[in-house]
Structure formats: structure tokens, C-alpha cells
Amino acid sequence: MVGCIAQAFYAPSAFRVLLLIVDYENRHVHLLARITSAEHFVGATYLLGSLYAITTKSSDVLIYTGHSPYDLSQRIHVDGMVAVDIATCYVNICVYILDNGNGRVSRIDRKHTLNTFIDGLQHGDLIRMSVIRSRIRLFS
């Protein structure tokens, strides 16, 4: 069993996202992709051949092709979004975005359709989320 982990980190000259492949026992880690951008990445995740990334000061979810040369293929705009976390759900085959600006969790399905999954959260206090199977746990 293999899982994919996307990790955003800061390098002195640019902001980067590393996409790593990890086996289920976390014994082997392999670098799959390294993307450099002038935008500050907050987080990233991988699902079905696409890399999804969120950045500071942007209301867009960036979608890159999941293969070399990892081109930006689509931007999904969410009015007022202040994205603070992003996660993949392999049970529901989707990506969740924790939106601190609008106080909600948005869901992007495999066709890149965006909808609101959880609404009415206290905006401004959301920090991160975790997805285990099909359940979302929020932290503030």
C-alpha cells in the first residue's frame, strides 16, 4: 500500500512544494515532484494525478498536473477564501479545503467541481483539519 504526501516548505530564494510518496509503514520515502513558485504555499495534496495547492494572499486553489513538467492546469477561485489547510479523502475521492475567511470546509471532487461541505464555522479561528477515512476533524 502506498500513499502520497504533499509538503509545502520555504526555501531562501523561493517557495516550494515537495510531493513525496510514502509506503504504508513509512519505511521508504521517494521524491516525486518539486515545484517552485513565487507564491507562498500554505499546503498541498495529491489526488488522482493532480496536485492541489493553496497559497497565502490568494483566493484560488491551484491545480497542477501530477506528472512532469507539473504545469499549472487550473485555478479554482473561491470568493473571500483564506485557505489554512488542505487534505485528501481517498474514501470520498475528493480534496477538502479549510477556509478560515468564509468559515467553511469546501470540497473539490474528481471532476474539479467545488461545493461547500461544511458551512457556518467560526471564521477567523480555524487552524487545521485532519481527514481520517471519511470524517473531518477541525482544530481551532
Image (tube, grey):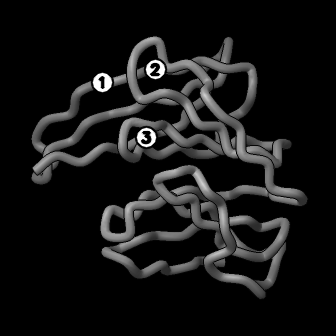
Given contact means CB atoms under 8 Å apart, are the residues at marks 3 and 2 in contact? no
At x 72%, y 33%, the residue is 40
Q: Earlier in the sequence, mark 3 or mark 1?
A: 3
At x 73%, y 83%, the residue is 119
Residue 43 occupies quadrant = top right
Given contact means CB atoms under 8 Å apart, are the residues at marks 1 and 2 in contact? yes
Q: Amino acid at mark 3?
A: Ala
Disc on res. 31? 1
Q: Residues within 10 Å of mark 1 (few under 14, many from 20)?
A: few
Q: Position of residue 7 (x, y in %)?
A: 46, 39
Disc on res. 34? 2
Q: Is residue 137 left or right of residue 99?
A: left
- Residue with the mark numbered 3: 6
Count the labels in the image: 3
**Residue projecting furthest to the front:** 111
Q: Amino acid at mark 1?
A: Leu
At x 76%, y 44%, the residue is 60
Q: Is residue 15 left or right of residue 21?
A: right
Q: Residues within 10 Å of mark 2 (few under 14, many from 20)?
A: some
